């Protein structure tokens, strides 16, 4: 179901639709736009395989879908897309998760095929978003121009104010964009999504990679970003990355159920997954 904004709340916050068929708003100097498109066709998939130098891609790649947040005056642009995420998967190149022998046959495309899983078939990615600074750009659309540079994220001691984010405040805009998805040959799920929420005080987003290999393990990699709207000042953007992981064997030893059906919603069961890595960073403009 598409999000329906309240016109009165939008007007009170000074938000303006982007127009030209674009989904999103211009608010307090930020262009925030979500783009949801169909999965890549076979021709484009082949091009991606050549660029990524792989013959393996998720079953459903929403290659033209994205979320873009552009601060017009400073040129800061933060965006999320499947290609950059899969570049991260390719570079990290984790060893393949072991699949129970009884389930390996599901990965065959033909009955006579030999199953050799010599790559990370879960498409786990360390991706936490893409960011550039477009000094001379006047529009949030299109690729970065020649004056663009990679934004620098610096570790910091500040943390996201989750209490403030949980306070009741009008939601001016909300959307969720799926970047890629794979059902692991009916052996679980691998899913990368990004959600954005815009309030009168600022914006908040969650990039989530969720993996469940039935009977083997669960992996959750969350990236949260928050920006409070500031008048006539460069924005302060905090980014928190939190990676969690647990095996079904470890769940069983703690007395938790091991039925995969009990773990369909990562938002509900995330606290059962121990933290593997966590850090908070601030966007630095140089």
Image (cartoon, rainbow, N blue to C red):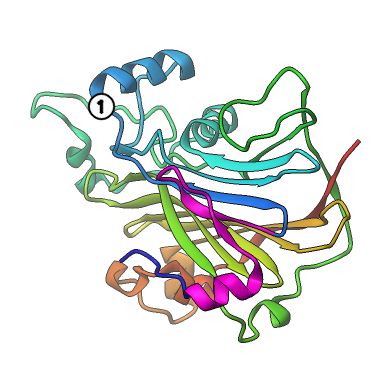
Q: Is residue 22 left or right of residue 117?
A: right
**Residue under the point 10% across and 27% down:** 110
Q: Quadrant of residue 119?
A: top left
Judging depth in this view, the residue of 238 and 9 nearest the camera is 9
- Label 1 crowd (10 A; few <14 / some 14-19 / many >=20): few
> Does residue 235 belong to the magenta stretch?
no
So how many labels did they put on this image? 1
Query: Looking at this rendering, what residue extends furthest in the bottom direction?
Result: 168
Image vertical order of residue 125 relative to residue 265, above or below: above
Spot occupied by residue 63 in the image (x, y as percentages of width and height): 40, 33
Q: Quadrant of residue 111?
A: top left
**Residue under the point 40% across and 34% down:** 64
> Does residue 9 belong to the magenta stretch?
yes
Observer able to see residue 126:
no
Spot occupied by residue 248 in the image (x, y as percentages of width and height): 41, 64
Instruction: Give the position of the C terminus as an image quadrant.
Output: top right
Judging depth in this view, the residue of 194 and 11 nearest the camera is 11
**Residue under the point 24% across and 29% down:** 115
Query: Looking at this rendering, what residue extends furthest in the left direction?
Result: 111
Judging depth in this view, the residue of 27 and 120 nearest the camera is 27
Image vertical order of residue 36 relative to residue 241, above or below: above
Q: Which residues are magenta?
A: 7-27
Q: Is residue 156 left or right of residue 174?
A: right
Spot occupied by residue 91 in the image (x, y as percentages of width and height): 58, 27
Q: Quadrant of residue 13?
A: bottom right
| Secondary structure at numbered mark 1 | loop
**Residue under the point 44% across and 42% down:** 20
Spot occupied by residue 78 in the image (x, y as percentages of width and height): 66, 43
Observer able to see residue 77:
yes
* Residue identified by numbered label 1: 41
């Amino acid at each position: 179901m598409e999000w329906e904004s309240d016109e009165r709340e939008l007007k009170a916050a000074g938000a303006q639709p982007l127009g030209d068929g674009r989904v999103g708003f211009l608010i307090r100097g930020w262009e925030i736009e979500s783009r949801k498109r169909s999965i890549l066709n076979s021709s484009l998939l082949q091009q991606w395989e050549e660029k990524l130098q792989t013959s393996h891609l998720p079953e459903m790649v929403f290659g033209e879908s994205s979320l873009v947040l552009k601060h017009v005056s400073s040129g800061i642009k933060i965006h999320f897309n499947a290609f950059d995420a899969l570049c991260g998967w390719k570079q990290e190149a984790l060893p393949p998760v072991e699949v129970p022998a009884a389930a390996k046959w599901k990965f065959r495309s033909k009955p006579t095929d030999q199953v050799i899983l010599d790559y990370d078939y879960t498409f786990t990615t360390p991706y936490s978003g893409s960011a550039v600074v477009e000094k001379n750009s006047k529009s949030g659309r299109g690729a970065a121009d020649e004056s663009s540079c990679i934004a620098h994220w610096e570790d910091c001691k500040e943390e996201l104010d989750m209490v403030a984010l949980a306070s009741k405040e009008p939601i001016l805009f909300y959307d969720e964009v799926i970047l890629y998805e794979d059902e692991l040959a009916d052996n679980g799920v691998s899913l990368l999504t990004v959600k954005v929420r815009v309030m009168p005080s600022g914006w908040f987003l969650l990039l989530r990679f969720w993996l469940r290999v039935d009977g083997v393990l669960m992996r959750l990699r969350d990236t949260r970003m928050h920006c409070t709207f500031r008048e006539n000042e460069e924005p302060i953007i905090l980014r928190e990355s939190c990676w969690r992981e647990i095996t079904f064997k470890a769940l069983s030893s703690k007395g938790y159920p091991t039925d995969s059906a009990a773990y369909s919603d990562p938002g509900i069961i995330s606290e059962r997954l121990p933290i593997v890595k966590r850090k908070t960073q601030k966007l630095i403009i140089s």
